Amino acid sequence: MRHETSCKRLCLIGSTGSIGTQTLDIVAAHPDRYAVTVLCAGSNVNALTGQALRFRPRSVVIADDGKFNELKKNLEGTGIKVHAGAQALCEAVQRADVDMIVNATVGYSGLAPTIAAIGAGKDIALANKETLVVAGELIRRLLKSSPSRIYPIDSEHSAIAQCLAGEDTDSVRRLIITASGGPFRTWTTQQLEKATVADALHHPNWSMGAKITIDSATMLNKAFEIIEAHYLFNIPAERIVPMVHPQSIVHSMVEFADGAVKAQLGIPDMRLPIAYALGEGKRLAGASNPLTLPQMMQLTFSAPDTGKFPCLTFAETALKRGGNAACTINAANEVANLAFRQGKIPFNAIYTVVARTLDHEDFIEAPEYEDYVATNTSACRHAAEIVHDIAVKTIYAT
Ligand code: NDP
Ligand code: MG
């Protein structure tokens, strides 16, 4: 693929993942509009090599520096520069030959590149919601003194941005964030005790990376999205309402002061919100297939069941406490989510690990970047200890 300087030059973080590959689908379909200057992945050398040979970026970055030599060897003679490690990622987003960052890495690893991008005044198409969950207050503050803008890729937040286009944000009464309810929407609490990893990874409407699919099953994903919406749109937490909508056709809604409600509808296809973010709010013809009338004939809505999905309550806890609380919740969840996927703890224990870590962790009211780093490290350690306790008890109980 040719590298055009007349089109928007992207640094794509998380290129080998679900959002990353769909972003590259859009780039491949619109070489007149988009080119990739840098591709970055975590550790999947083979996938990154294949993408590099196809899209011909100037550089690639692999976060896992143990994979540097293998990647370098694969790309020998291509002229593509190879870098490795977290620092290289932060340098990549600041390059002069990059116009926009697509941040589609997973988890806490998205925070540092977002901050580096804001420092360099770059616009960001943000899929990595954990950036705003971990350090929303800091990001908001940094954005005030930077020309950078954040364009959300998360479908609900893209929907809200689409509803708010041309509107006065003072006239917003409520944001209504829809949720599919995940694979366990109709399960009982007793059934949830026996939920397997395969059950939890079987999302009814969306095909996504493993971590967010488990977050959707616990509904912590929706709690994260409330936090994300709070920081993106500057709306108080009590005016952001989650609503279960199993069809995933209405991607979210905005209720205005005059009683009007605007919604954005579409088939569940992330290429639409990705294209809308890449286009800075301009629509890309053919980004997704349109809805058909029968798909719109059965749209149902109900309140979420926080008894069955207690992780949803972490949104209120995080935003009421403020400070480093959401950073702690995110760190504990990253550990618990992975431990569940590795078969170490039962599904319902994900909530327990997060709640107990939150009880343990020191509260910092006005964290700076270093405090978030320290909180993340410490909360991951605490959460790992709690996981270990639960894992031992689970083995003895069976
Ligand atoms: P995936 O797990 O599919 O992909 C994650 C990507 O990040 C991979 O390319 C992975 O590389 C890379 N990566 C992992 N660790 C690092 C690191 N330390 N530094 C740089 N890159 C790294 O995740 P998704 O695409 O599903 O999700 C990405 C983000 O988008 C998440 O924050 C998620 O919540 C959000 N999101 C996703 C949606 C979806 O439909 N998938 C919808 C809405 C939001 P490697 O392959 O080498 O491991
Ligand atoms: Mg979402």
Image (cartoon, rainbow, N blue to C red):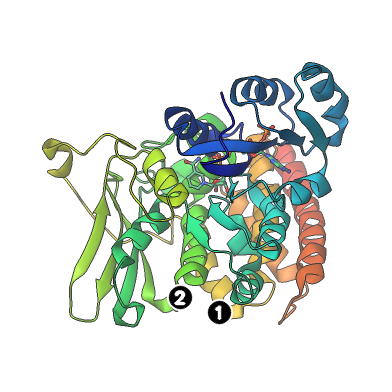
Q: Quadrant of ligand 1?
A: top right
Horizontal and vertical percent position of residue 99:
59, 50
- Check disc 1 and report its element: helix, strand or loop: helix
Q: Is residue 43 above or below residue 168?
A: above
x then y, percent, for residue 285? 30, 39
**Left or right: 230 as drawn, with respect to 55:** left
Asked if 167 appears above or below 160 in the picture, the reply is below
Say if disc 1 is inside 8 Å of ligand 2: no
The disc labelled 1 sits on which kind of residue? Lys
Question: Pointers 1 and 2 in contact (CB under 8 A)?
Answer: yes
Q: Position of residue 41 (x, y in %)?
A: 69, 35
> What amino acid is found at the position of numbered circle 2 in the picture?
Ala
Left or right: 295 as drawn, with respect to 84: left
Determine the CA span between mark 1 and mark 2. 8 Å
The residue that mark 2 highlights is 237
Mark 1, residue position? 320
Whichever of callouts 1 and 2 sits on the residue coming sooner in the sequence is 2
Total number of numbered discs in the rendering: 2
> Which residue occupies the foreground of this view, 270 or 300?
270
Whether residue 196 is visible = no
Task: Residue 5: name its quadrant.
Answer: top right
Which image quarter: residue 369?
bottom right
